[in-house]
Image: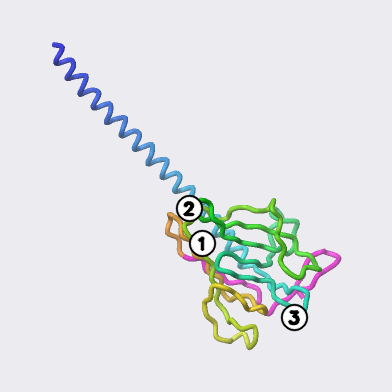
Amino acid sequence: SLIELLIAMTILGFILGLLFSGFRLASSSWDNAERHMDDNSQAQIGRSFLRNLLTQAYPHRWKGVPPRVAFVGAPNGLRFVTELPTHLSSGGLQQISLDVKQNGEKFELAFRRGDLRGEDIDFGPGDEQSERTVIGNATKVAFSYFGPESAEGPLEAPSRWTDEWVNTKRLPKLVRIHIETPSAWPDLLISPLIAQEGNCRWDDFYKRCVPQ
């Protein structure tokens, strides 16, 4: 009868609606899982890149009186000198900047490099074309530094954590990068491998800073 047909069509429509909702939920869950995996992959690449950069931080000293080690640390970024792979630069030691920038309601960590020249007495603005995002989609990015605050005294002087690195004679013993993202990652703790009292000289032939 007509009533039975209407009831059957209603039940069929209800079942199809449930199936469609299930498909949409499965598709959304799959997309979210893929997005989460991609974010994790990008975060791992970024963290590895940061670790490699800071592990190889070099205690180059600017020309000038008194000489200052080329390392400036702040809560929202830092400047230092390191050697980059040839696919990222022309070779040799480079000036590096890592800056926390706001992007809407989120924060990102931007990388920029610049050539290190023999006559340099401080960090330059870097090459805009080299800028890239290392860490994105973060709710917070902050730097802190561990080592002796005073530029005077022996290396064995008492050390502590601080939000700014003001010691002009030495690199910090540790750099901590706190990154808050949807994925819970532990803080990055990085120790420069080159001796704290290391130095380098400018080689006019190779056009680069080389260890003494």
> As displayed, is residue 158 above or below residue 189?
below
Bounds of the magenta segment: 187-212
Q: Do tag 2 and tag 1 residues touch (Cβ < 8 Å)? A: no
Assess whether residue 40 is covered by the magenta stretch: no
Looking at the picture, tell me which residue is in the foreground, 116 or 108: 108
Q: Residue 133 carries which label?
A: none
The reply, left or right, for residue 187 in relation to residue 191 is left
Amino acid marked by disc 2: Glu
Mark with earlier residue (2, 1)? 2
Element under disc 2:
loop
Counting from the top left corner in percent of width and height, residue 100 is at 56, 60
- Quarter occupied by the N terminus: top left
Counting from the top left corner in percent of width and height, residue 119 is at 81, 68
Mark with earlier residue (3, 2)? 3
Q: How far apart are marks 3 and 2 (CA)?
A: 42 Å
Snapshot colouring: rainbow
Q: Name the residue under label 2.
A: 105
Q: Which mark is residue 141?
A: 1
Q: Do tag 3 and tag 2 residues touch (Cβ < 8 Å)? A: no
- Quarter occupied by the C terminus: bottom right
The reply, left or right, for residue 165 in relation to residue 212 is left
Amino acid marked by disc 1: Val
Q: Which residue shows up at 21% across the image and 22% down it?
A: 10
Give the mark toward the camera: 3 or 2: 2
Assess whether residue 211 is covered by the magenta stretch: yes
Q: Mark 3 points at which residue?
A: 66
Amino acid marked by disc 3: Pro
Give the mark toward the camera: 2 or 1: 2
